[in-house]
Image (cartoon, helix red, strand yellow):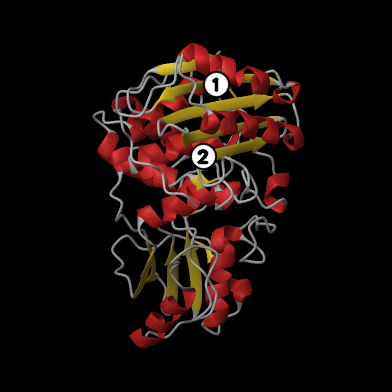
Amino acid sequence: PTPLAALTTDAPTPGADGLAAALAPALANPDLGVLTGQITDAATGDVLWRRDADVAQTPGSVTKVLTAAAALLVLSPAHRIPTTVVPGAAPGELVLVGGGDPTLTAQPAGEDGYYTDAPRLDDLVEQIVASGIPVRSLLVDDSLFGQPSMAEGWLTVDIAGGSIAPIESVMLDGGRQPPLVDYSPRTATPALDAGRTLAQRLGLDPGTVALGTAPTTAEPIATVWSAPLSVRLHQMMVQSDDVTAETIGREIARAAGKPATFEGTVAAVTDAVSASGIDVSGLVLRDASGLSTEDRIPARLLDDVLTAATGDGDAADELRPLVDDLAVGGGSGTLWDRFVSPSPGAGWVRAKTGTLDFVNALAGIVTDVDGRALTFTLMSTGTPSAVAKPALDAVAVTLRECGCRQ
C-alpha cells in the first residue's frame, strides 16, 4: 500500500465550495440512507464539509477510534498484561489468575495463535512443572473484571455468531472455537474454558475446574505476558476485534482508577478524550467496541479525534500512532476487500469501519491528488451494508481524486 504522505501545508487547500460540488453526485446516492459526516483539512483543522455532524448516531465499530485514542493518551505503548498461576489455599491447589489478557493461546509451540505475539498456555505449564509443586486441583480467578460480562445493547446471539464473548479476565484466543478463525463461534464461559484446558495439560480432570479466588498474598509460580499495547491496539483496530477493544478499555479504566467494568471503561474513555481538549458533547457509550446498539457518537467527535492525531496540537504526539492503526484500503484488515486496485482509493484511504444492521460508517484519512491530507467521518443509517458500503467508499474516493480548489 502507498505510504501516507507527510502532512504539509504547502499543498493546495481544497475549498469548501469546490469540495461540496465535487461530492454532490456521490452524496446524492440514496444508498447512503441517512448520512451525517464531517471532512476536515488535517493540517489546519479547518472544517471543509459537514452534514448534521453534531447529531449523535449509532456508530458501530468506529467507536474503536475513541477507545484507541484513550489508550494512547492514558497507557504506555509498551504496557503488557500478566496471566499468572499462584498456589491456592488448599494443598496441591493452583489458581489461574486472569490479568485481563484475552490473547493467551493454547496453540502448541511453533504454531501462531489468533493474536500477534500471543503468550502461550504451554509456557505456564512448563513453569508449573519446573516449580516442582504437586498439582491436585485447579481454580480460575476471573475477579479482576466486574459484572456484567455483557454490555447493554449486546445480543447473546453474537456469541455464537462470533462477534463477542462474555468479557472475562482470562480467555484463550478471545474465546474463539476454533481458535484461528476471525468469526468462529465464541464460548459463553471463556475463563472456565481456559482453566479446563490448562487442567487437561497438567493431567487433571477438566471437569473439576471451578471459579474461585486466589489468596491475596500468593506469589506467582508461573507468569506469561501479553504483547505490548502497541501490538494489541494495532490488531484491535485493523481487524476490528471486539474482545480486545473491551479488555483494552478495562486497562484504560484501571489506569484511570475506575472499576474494570463497562461503566468504568466508558467513563475512562470519555474522560481521556475530553481531557485532550476534544468536545465530547453528544457522546453516549455502553461499551468500548461499538457492538452495542445503544452507543451514540456525533461524526464531529470522531473527525476531531482523527484531526488531532494528524495535526500538530497538544495531543498530537500521543495520538499519532492512531493513523498507522487504521486499515489500508485494498491492503489490510477490514478494508482488504474495499478500495481494491484499480480503485483510486487503493493504498490512499486509511480508515476504521463500522457495521451493524443498517448501520455503516467509515472514519479515517485520505491524501488528495494535490497532496493535502483530509480527515473524514461518514456515518450512514437505514440501508443495508451491501449497498451502503460501496456508497460510502465512493465518497472517500471522491476525496482522493479531488483537488477541489475554488
Residue 91 in the figure: left or right of residue 20: left
Q: Residue at x 55, y 15 (%)?
A: 20
Residue located 30% across and 23% down the image: 277
* Numbered circles on residues, count: 2
Secondary structure, mark 1, is strand
Q: Secondary structure at mark 2?
A: strand
Whether residue 395 can be seen here = yes
Residue 189 falls left or right of residue 367: right
Within 10 angstroms of label 2, few (less than 14), some, or many (20 or more) residues? many
* Horizontal and vertical percent position of residue 239: 55, 51
Is there a contact, CB below 8 Å, between mark 1 and mark 2? no
Query: Mark 1 or 2 closer to N-term?
Result: 1
Is residue 259 visible to the viewer in this orientation of the structure?
Answer: no
Question: Is residue 16 placed above or below 308 in the rendered structure?
Answer: above
Residue 378, by quadrant, is top right
Spatial separation of the CA atoms under disc 1 and disc 2? 14 Å
Q: Amino acid at mark 2?
A: Ala
- Reading the image, the residue beneath label 1 is 37
Snapshot quadrant of residue 228 = bottom left
Q: Is residue 20 above or below residue 61?
A: above
Disc 2 marks which residue? 351
Residue at the location (51% across, 49% down)?
Answer: 238
Indicate the position of residue 26 as horizontal and vertical percent values. 66, 23
